[in-house]
Image (cartoon, rainbow, N blue to C red):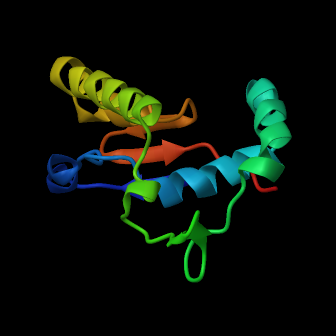
Amino acid sequence: MLRIHLTAGDLLKTRFASQPAPLVETVLGVAALQRRDPVFRGWRRSAAARLPTAARPAGAGATIGDRPAVPGSAHHRPGPRIMTAFRSELAWRSRLITELGIQAALSALHPSISWNGTVMQVEATCE
């Protein structure tokens, strides 16, 4: 079990991102592709089928068409579907904070999260 000891001050400073983080989403997506969690089975099949043609190198030297792929450029901005989903998620978490508090909003991040006072506990298994 992972235990994160937080003070009341820590909880007061807790906030959610104001926009999606594409690199974080990419890392989490790759991790989800590698896991065999049945919850992601349909998505994993769909994503894996598209990956060879959809995967494009990003960063130094990469190009999109005849222009360099520059982080922060329009080519790296989230699309409308991602922004709509992100805004919906942020609105839902805001309602949770308003109605039930920050601990409820943080608990909803994953089913393995629980609280013991100001200690966030995350059930974790070693793989």
Picture quarter with the C terminus: bottom right
Q: Compared to 5, does 120 lie above or below?
A: above
Q: Is residue 38 visible?
A: no
Which residue does the image show at 31% across and 22% down from the upper left? 92
Which residue does the image show at 23% across and 47% down from the upper left? 15
Quadrant hosting residue 9: bottom left
* Image position, residue 76 (x, y; %): 45, 57
* Image position, residue 55 (x, y; %): 72, 55
Which of 60 and 25 lies nearest the eye of the viewer? 60
Q: Is residue 7 visible?
A: yes
Which residue does the image show at 21% across and 55% down from the upper left? 10
Which residue, as the protein is rendered here, is positioned at the far bottom? 60
| Left or right of residue 104, residue 39 in this image | right
Which of 8 and 82 lies nearest the eye of the viewer? 82
* Image position, residue 115 (x, y; %): 40, 37
Quadrant hosting residue 36: top right
Picture mark count: 0
* Image position, residue 110 (x, y; %): 53, 34
Q: Compared to 80, does 29 lie above or below?
A: below
Which residue, as the protein is rendered here, is positioned at the far front? 66
Which residue does the image show at 72% across and 44% down from the upper left? 32
Which of 94 and 61 lies nearest the eye of the viewer? 61
Q: Compared to 108, does 18 lie above or below?
A: below
Which residue, as the protein is rendered here, is positioned at the far top? 99
Quadrant hosting residue 7: bottom left
